[in-house]
Amino acid sequence: MKLDTSGLESSAPLFGSSNELIDGISAGPSFEIPDTMDFDGFQKEAVQMVKPAKGTTTLAFIFKEGVMVAADSRASMGGYISSQSVKKIIEINPYMLGTMAGGAADCQFWHRNLGIKCRLHELANKRRISVTGASKLLANILFSYRGMGLSVGTMIAGWDETGPGLYYVDSEGGRLKGTRFSVGSGSPYAYGVLDNGYRYDMSIEEAAELARRAIYHATFRDAASGGVASVYYVGPDGWKKLSGDDVGELHYKYYPVMPSTVEQEMVEVAGA
Amino acid sequence: MSIFEYNGSALIAMVGKNCFAIASDRRLGVQLQTIATDFQRIYKIHDRLFLGLSGLATDAQTLYQRLVFRHKLYQLREERDMKPETFASLVSAVLYEKRFGPYFCQPVIAGLGEEDKPFICTMDSIGAKELAKDFVVAGTASESLYGACEAMFKPDMEAEELFETISQALLSSVDRDCLSGWGGHVYVITPTEVKERILKGRMD
């Protein structure tokens, strides 16, 4: 099975000895291929241990002014909350963002790898890579590792010559172009709020508030989402972080505690 | 996720000076989806005896109804309320009856016994009693709860301080558990009064 190992090439040879390898075509270090015919089954135990449950909520949508990207910040291992402050919006380069859902290590590594390849493209072609091109690079790499247990559910959002771009890419090898996406276990709840409040011509503040509310509602209903709702905006000049609000405080801002009418009053009992 | 983690729950009971407190979270979920944020897990058996049931919600409700039935019969026959120690033995027996097809619950029993001495105990799902002098915990967040209680507990606390301690222990533990939280429900019971309070917690 020929894997696409271009993502792991480095110009320096491993042991510095074999000359036939340094010929312009560098076959650098690659992941070792296991000594088995059953590529899909042998990793089942290992995959179960990592538990790629995609417990998260991320969303992105295109509107008149650009692309709005938002995510929660909870990392869960089964029922345990391992962190409430994970950065799920990854900055690939100053005008492109990627979101993280699934295995944290997988997403972080391959997004950074994508950033490297985008930069190499810029240097080789003297122009920035398009969002279409960047998402295709990532999708091809993930497709070649299909069945090996990677868990990545990401959205690539950016601004290129053709305007705002948004693609959904996952570890099964799928790649979809679209205007509205939400990924993760909290995505049904986020879609409900997002689809209800979405209009193409919103201002940046309105779009940010919609994204924030959608994430908040997902963290309320979904147990695997929570922490901080981060909202990023991608415009013609690149991305900008707009806000990072703790959802615990957002709840009481949206639904403040009202003093309720007293039904039964308790009085101190004199003596015992 | 196991059957005990299907609905999600968190329970603590703590002993103070001639008083006790019992607290629970308020979430009812179906695996990762939250269905309700006002679910009652602590039930009053009589004025000086409270029962908290963690684990599978349907078994908790059915078990509570059976135990209330048994206690009402006891009240009719004996013309008095059950002592907490007796009630604990009753719960243990009812659970062991279903040894080979158990109720997927972990009960927490808290009450004031003779001479207003507080009594707390917990059990596993087939009735093994665990009596403690300081605190007992149950639920999906039980490991976090043990840690928090161990760190925050002091013997012979008065009612107000006990309320603060149990609330902080509950809230900080459920903030590390996906499946429980969404507020808190605390009962502080002294020989003269029962104080019920709702806690404002993180709703994520």
Image: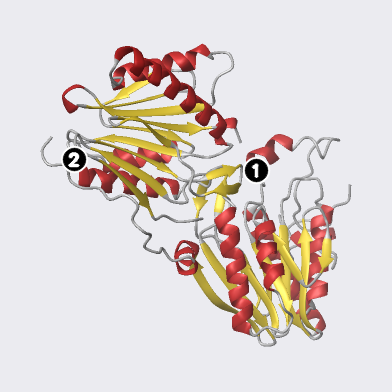
Residue at 58% x, 49% y: name it: B34
Mark 2 chain: B
Residue A62's spot in the image, x, y percent?
A: 73, 77
For the residues marked 2 and 1, what is the alpha-carbon distance in whole angstroms? 43 Å
Above or below B84: residue B17: below
Residue A37's label in the rendered image is none
Residue at 36% x, 22% y: name it: B130
Residue at 57% x, 50% y: name it: A223
Left or right of A19 on screen, residue B28: left
Residue A245's spot in the image, x, y percent?
A: 49, 69
Which residue is denoted by mark 1 in the rendering?
A51
As rendered, which of A28 and B192 lies closer to the eye? B192
Q: Is residue A244 visible?
A: yes
Dot 2 surroundings within 10 Å: few (below 14), some, or many (20 or more)? some
Dot 1 surroundings within 10 Å: few (below 14), some, or many (20 or more)? some
Above or below B111: residue A169: below
Residue B157's label in the rendered image is 2
Toward which corner of the image does residue B153 lie, by quadrant? top left
As rendered, which of A2 and A185 lies closer to the eye? A185
Left or right of B86 on screen, residue A202: right
Toward which corner of the image does residue B196 lie, by quadrant? top left
Residue at 64% x, 38% y: name it: A49
Left or right of B165 on screen, residue A187: right
Q: Secondary structure at mark 1?
A: loop
Q: Amino acid at mark 2?
A: Met
